[in-house]
């Protein structure tokens, strides 16, 4: 009971941090003007933006499925993996960093694949995403050095992390937290084994998941999907620019920069990036001559539209998993997908 209260208190604190960040982002802004901008938005472009973000989620499921397949414990169906990814995003809206564990739990239940190995694939996936983000940051800075170098240093490395080294530490700590969430569960499953045998088996399973990329057959598909995921995110941002009159003139390079701002904001351990996303994106757009209120309108439109679709489709995915048995949607041997 005490553990439940402690965890609930921790998540409440994180939510309050997000709300405080949201308050400071919108403080001193004319909310009526902001709402007026949102009412004038062309929601056809917002829908198109959400669609491309959704394609990115599907590609993420496709990539993860390839990694799971290389573990040698069977291959979950694409639709099943997609459900798991959406449920993971849904869990992140309530509990930061729980989405990774949640989607592993889904595949574990539907396909009986060891959860520790699944966690290993997620760690590997996050490391690949970190490399991709690093490349995108490098590309954005090279193409817009004068604009971005000072902004990223002053507003990210100093204000958000205190020092450059803390950003890297934050990413690796997040990966470690993912592992820690499942340690207790795994040890309970193997309580008949000695403690050293448990630790050794846990290490081997994690290692197997992390190095699943090495034994993957379709490496070209893995690389292509990794690139396309981030390309879809960039296109989604660009299409949302077009939806608002104040940002419609912004081009692909600004979308690239905004992808950097938004991705770095999502590292913050708050539910769904609330507050951090709005502040970082609106602050970043000011270097392109966009007023803070207009930048906040854009950030609110982009974040809200994608959050709402995750709430909707993640909930539907959860319901469908309850309705359908693993035999109906579980694996390729049953002829599904």
Image (cartoon, grey):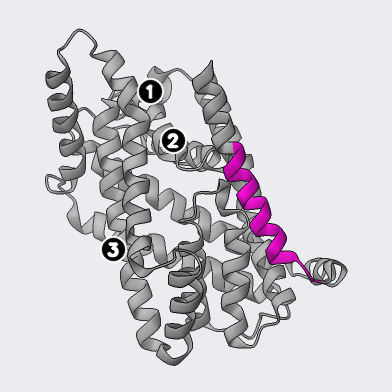
Question: Which quadrant of the view contains residue 70?
Answer: top left
Mark in front: 2 vs 3: 3
Report the span colored magenta: 12-29
Instruction: Pick whichever, 321 or 120, lies toward us.
Output: 120
**Mark 2 residue element:** helix
Image spot of residue 169 (x, y percent):
33, 56
Q: Residue reaching furthest front?
A: 162
Q: Quadrant of the C terminus?
A: top left
The reply to whether residue 336 is visible in this rendering is: no
**Mark 1 residue element:** helix
**Residue 110: which numbered mark, if any?**
1
Report the side of 254 relative to 36 (left or right).
left
Q: Quadrant of the N terminus?
A: top right
User: Label 3 belongs to which residue?
Assistant: 131
Q: Residue reaching furthest top?
A: 192
Label 3: how many Cα within 10 Å (few below 14, some 14–19, many 20+) = few
The number of callouts visible is 3
């Amino acid at each position: 009971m005490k553990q439940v209260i402690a965890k609930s208190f921790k998540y409440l604190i994180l939510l309050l941090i997000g709300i405080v960040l949201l308050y400071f982002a919108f403080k001193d802004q004319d909310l009526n003007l902001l709402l007026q901008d949102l009412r004038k938005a062309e929601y056809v472009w917002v829908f198109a933006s959400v669609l491309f973000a959704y394609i990115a989620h599907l590609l993420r499921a496709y990539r993860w499925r390839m990694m799971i397949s290389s573990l040698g414990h069977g291959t979950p169906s694409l639709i099943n993996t997609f459900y798991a990814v959406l449920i993971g995003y849904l869990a992140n809206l309530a509990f930061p960093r729980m989405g990774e564990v949640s989607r592993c739990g889904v595949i574990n239940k539907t396909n009986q694949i060891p959860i520790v190995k699944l966690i290993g694939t997620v760690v590997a996936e996050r490391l690949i995403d970190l490399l991709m983000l690093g490349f995108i940051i490098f590309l954005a800075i090279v193409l817009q050095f004068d604009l971005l170098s000072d902004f990223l240093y002053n507003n990210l490395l100093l204000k958000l992390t205190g020092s450059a080294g803390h950003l890297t530490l934050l990413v690796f700590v997040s990966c470690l937290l993912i592992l820690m969430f499942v340690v207790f569960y795994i040890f309970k499953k193997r309580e008949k084994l000695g403690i050293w045998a448990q630790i050794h088996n846990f290490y081997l399973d994690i290692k197997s998941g992390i190095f699943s990329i090495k034994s993957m057959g379709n490496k070209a598909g893995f690389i292509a999907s990794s690139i396309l995921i981030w390309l879809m995110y960039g296109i989604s941002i660009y299409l949302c620019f077009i939806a608002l009159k104040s940002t419609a003139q912004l081009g692909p390079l600004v979308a690239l920069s905004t992808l950097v701002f938004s991705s770095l904001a999502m590292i913050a351990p708050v539910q769904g990036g609330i507050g951090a996303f709005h502040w970082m994106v609106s602050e970043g757009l000011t270097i392109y001559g966009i007023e803070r209120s207009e930048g906040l309108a854009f950030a609110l439109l982009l974040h809200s539209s994608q959050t709402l679709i995750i709430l909707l489709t993640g909930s539907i995915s959860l319901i469908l998993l309850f309705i359908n048995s693993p035999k109906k949607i579980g694996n390729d041997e049953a002829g599904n997908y």
